[in-house]
Amino acid sequence: MSTIPFIDLKTQYKTIKLQIQDRINRVLDHGQYVMGPEMVELEERLQDFCGVKHCVSVASGTDALLISLMALGVAPGDEIITTSFTFVATVEVIVLLGAKPIFVDIEANTCNIDANKIEEKINAKTKAIIPVSLYGQPANFYEINSIATKHNLVVIEDAAQSFGAKYKDKKSCNLSTIGCTSFFPSKPLGCYGDGGAIFTNDENIAKDCSEIRVHGQSQRYVHSRIGLCGRMDTIQCAVLLAKLERFDWEIEMRIEIGQRYNELMDEAGINRVYQHSDRTSVFAQYTIFINERELFQKKLTESGIPTAIHYPVTMNQQPAYLDLSYPNITPIAEKVAKKVISLPMHPYLHEKDQKLIVNKIVSSLD
């Protein structure tokens, strides 16, 4: 029995194999494996893509978040408002700096942070807000930014899953003071290892982030601040430069395939993550809601349909974070975490395979 790929990186590679090899060979020829010319080229291309003034490439999406918080001077005693329904990186960077994550519940239909519940969590200790643009769809940044401006707070978009998406005609990573994304291989724009980037229109923040990523160095062997080793390898920059040539087409295909999924799910009466009309999604995951998930997942696996769960346990219920929060403070997120399941989704997914997937879902629910 053949299995439909969950994410088809092999087909993507075959399509751009020559461009990938050419870009990597250039790095091998010049030998500047760290902070080589491809890094500068990539940062310029990415800031143009997002419409921002500054892009700082870093070693991972996690480092992007951590470095951004360090640039803001986040310290023990500070509080950072974020969602409990996210990958652990969003929260662990807060705790690593000695700050406290303050969890806000989510919208049940989009799984993004509920902007209407943010303001009640703000106090004198609040330093920033980190909304996560989950599953590829930006959160409600109009409301979030309005609240932040009112209380003089910084907003950092965790755009690890939404690079290439738009909100009211502005690109993800250009929706707030700082945008952070990941180039992990499975992301909408992924390299062949770890990588990430920070985006901002604030020159001082960009300068601080650039110094922090190279051990806090303002000039060679002059360390003006505490930093870390957060550089992205030149070869990973080269891979992304090759992939960028096709990225606009891949975004179009992701939207087309995601919308087709929506139509098929709606026709079949299957509850799915909702997409707002004032924003696009790049469908980093295509996610539906299932009540008896374990049995359902088993049936799909037996039918050759791979699935994944993003995410089965909310952050406030994770063992490492139990002492940082109150139990049951995000009841919607905790309920949703028991129902979400993600399906095969990538720009090379054929319509016939989508229909097969939905047919298998329907039969699995009978």
Image (cartoon, rainbow, N blue to C red):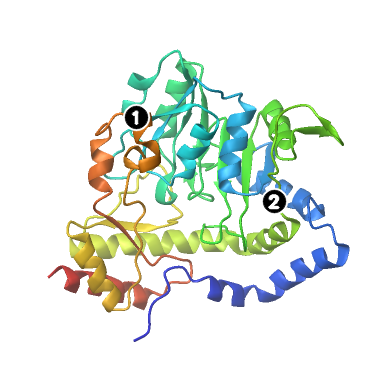
Q: What residue occupies the far top of the structure in this picture?
A: 124
Camera-side residue: 354 or 124? 124
- Point out the image quarter for the N terminus: bottom left
Residue at image point 58% right, 37% down: 66
The residue pinned by badge 1 equals 325
- Identity, as a three-letter code, of the amino acid under mark 2: Met
What amino acid does circle 1 point to? Ser
Identify the residue position indicated by label 2 in the image. 232
Report helix, strand or loop for mark 1: loop
Question: Which numbered marker is on residue 256?
Answer: none
User: In terms of sequence position, does the residue under pointer 2 or pointer 1 come before the other?
Assistant: 2
Is 205 placed left or right of 344 in the picture? right
Residue 220 vertical placement versus 77 (above, below): below
Q: Is residue 214 above or below residue 280?
A: above
Query: Residue at coordinates 39% horizontally, 76% vertically from top-left?
Result: 4
Residue 208 at x, y percent in the picture: 71, 30
- Callout 2 crowding tier (Cα within 10 Å): few <14, some 14–19, many ≥20: many
Is the residue under label 1 in contact with that under label 2 (CB below 8 Å)? no
Query: How far apart are the alpha carbons under marks 2 and 1?
Result: 34 Å
Residue 107 appears in which quarter of the rendering? top left
Q: Nearer the viewer, residue 24 or 263?
A: 24
- Left or right position of 363 against 195: left
Q: Front-most of 27 and 114?
A: 27
Quadrant housing the C terminus: bottom left
**Residue at screen point 79% across, 70% down:** 25
Residue 138 x/y as whole percent: 44, 42
Q: Position of residue 132 (x, y in %)?
A: 44, 40
- Of circles 2 and 1, which is in front? 1
Q: Is residue 271 visible?
A: yes
